[in-house]
Amino acid sequence: MRMSKLLMPTLREVPAEAEIASHRLMLRAAMMRKVAAGIYSYLPLGYRVLQKIMQIVREEMDAAGGQEVLLPIVQPAELWHETGRWDDYGEEMFKLIDRHERQFCLGPTHEEITTALVRNEVRSYRQLPLMVYQIQNKYRDEIRPRFGVMRGREFIMKDLYSFDRDEEGLDNSYWTMFHAYERIFARCGLNTRPVEADSGAIGGDQTHEFMAIADAGEAEIVYCSSCDYAANVEKAECLTPPAESTGREEPLVEVATPDVRTIEDLEKFFSRPASEMMKTLIYRGGDQVVAAVLRGDHEVNEIKLARAIGCLEVELADDRTIEEVTGAPRGFAGPIGLKNCKIIADPAVMSIESGIAGGNAVDVHLRGVKPGRDFTPDEIIDIRKAQPGDPCPCGQGVLQGARGIEVGQVFKLGTKYSEPLGATFTDEDGVERPLIMGCYGIGVSRTMAAIIEQCHDDDGICWPITVAPYHVDIVPVSYRDEQQRAAAERIYDELNKAGVEAVIDDRDERPGVKFKDADLIGFPIRITIGPRGLADGQVEVRWRATGEEYLISLNEVVSHVQDRITRAIAQSKCVCTG
Ligand code: ATP
Ligand code: MG
């Protein structure tokens, strides 16, 4: 490709709306342009990267036994009514109405469509297991589209659905996909970690999220320093180490605490650590009101709380409910003397011997609070978020914290969709049984952004060779110079013939501009043709990611870079196949 013809409007300025590196760089390096909130056009360079990622995904899905299909984006409401998700999916679903007043949605995911397809076409155990997948646009009217394509409203996803005859088959499909995901992300040059994740408030099915470790990630994860355990903090189990009793027992005392509101205020006022505070939060879940009691230094995990009371979701109660339950306005709740509400205490609270809690009255706190003596929780259940420093559930290590970008998820669905949609098969004995399903998604466009988060520096993107838009950027210092032009054109021609993806910077620009663009866009290799080297028949090879730089003869450069590229790509495949 000739840069003079390439649609690559790079930007020197940092776009104001972009908060994270990948978003800034995708705009600056001319990978994409915004059309509306969370909706983007990909320019030629960006689309090439996407296609490379899709190709890696496709190769691994095919190798794992997947069959590629293409399902419709526009989906009739009737199918979604059959599973109850037309109403349950919520505001994220883009809905539309056709000229005959029929309702449709733009597919946010394809469980309904796929299951309905399979229920009509698969009858017998002989056709199982079956895995079908597609790579296609998905639509979700996200409440907060942000970070460019990281959280878009239109985005590209690979979604695969597995159909098995029994749990054993599902297990097999699940782990086949799990390992395929490990290979895909490794081949894309991404450092990911599979973490145990929550499968939704109700249900206990197995699921892992693949997290690309990056500070810009929206997810918090914890992992063990001495075993393989890694989990999303929403899911991570919290071990409470047995507390040693000091036998300290203090009387319950009311203390006037005007203007003492936050945990930090309390720490100062009482000169006690947050671990001796009891924070009480009033929640509503369905038609229940619950008080969640946790240590002052712990955070409530709303997913665990919802699960504890058997609800899909909980939300903080409104002011009126708080007044009804505590007898005081918001901000003074404590566990003693609550009315008409269930008290759920986190196990860590129970070992506080003499705590500080809200007094359920304006500007009042209680000192000397002892669980069991002064209040009795209805239930003692783990309802807190794991945090770095906690003991690992393995009992050996300590949990470390990190942030992650969810680039993929694998999920055992069981009969969640096959039952309501009536997708069954007939086994050897002629018995009709529901198909056992799994679903497996990869955010293809999000993966592109995640790669940039992990592979960039102050000058721009450093594409891993496997997903780079082009492998080589040929830069004659002056294209006008006849000798340099001839050498550059010769290299370009030979690279093309050798099947190496190359661009030639044939623009009439200053060398500084060309070098800046090369670094910003992030071609893995730059071949620079300058007057000094040429005098000796040499050109310069520079590797973007490592800064490695050397001279090589004009006659050898093509076979040299071809050889190194071929080896690097081959290596990316064998590293991950073990
Ligand atoms: P999130 O928790 O980030 O909203 P999700 O769990 O709802 O994602 P899934 O339904 O598991 O997403 O979708 C499969 C994959 O699609 C995700 O792992 C993610 O990589 C990608 N994805 C989901 N939502 C978006 C989005 N709004 N923009 C870009 N990629 C997305
Ligand atoms: Mg997910």
Image (cartoon, rainbow, N blue to C red):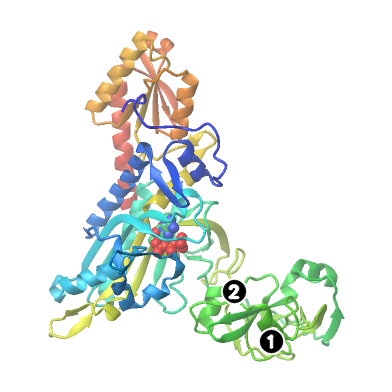
In the displayed structure image, the side of residue 134 where residue 299 appears, left or right: right
Q: Secondary structure at mark 1?
A: helix
* Mark 2 CB lies closer than 8 A to ligand 1: no
In the displayed structure image, the side of residue 488 where residue 459 appears, left or right: right
Q: Quadrant of the N terminus?
A: top left
Q: Which mark is residue 235?
A: none
- Sooner in the amino-acid sequence: mark 2 or mark 1: 1
* Mark 1 CB lies closer than 8 A to ligand 1: no
Sort mark 1 into few (<14), some (14-19) or many (20+) by Cα contacts within 10 Å.
many
Residue 171 shows up from this direction: no
Q: Look at label 2 and name its amino acid.
A: Arg
Does 567 sit above or below residue 90? Answer: above
Closer mark to the observer between disc 2 and disc 1 = 1
Residue at image coords 29%, 70%: 112
In the displayed structure image, the side of residue 406 where residue 272 appears, left or right: right
Question: How many discs mark residues in the rendered view?
Answer: 2
**Residue 409 placed where, x, y %?**
39, 63
Give the quadrant of ligand 1: bottom left
Q: Which mark is residue 325?
A: 1
**Residue 39 placed where, x, y %?**
43, 50
Q: Which mark is residue 384?
A: 2
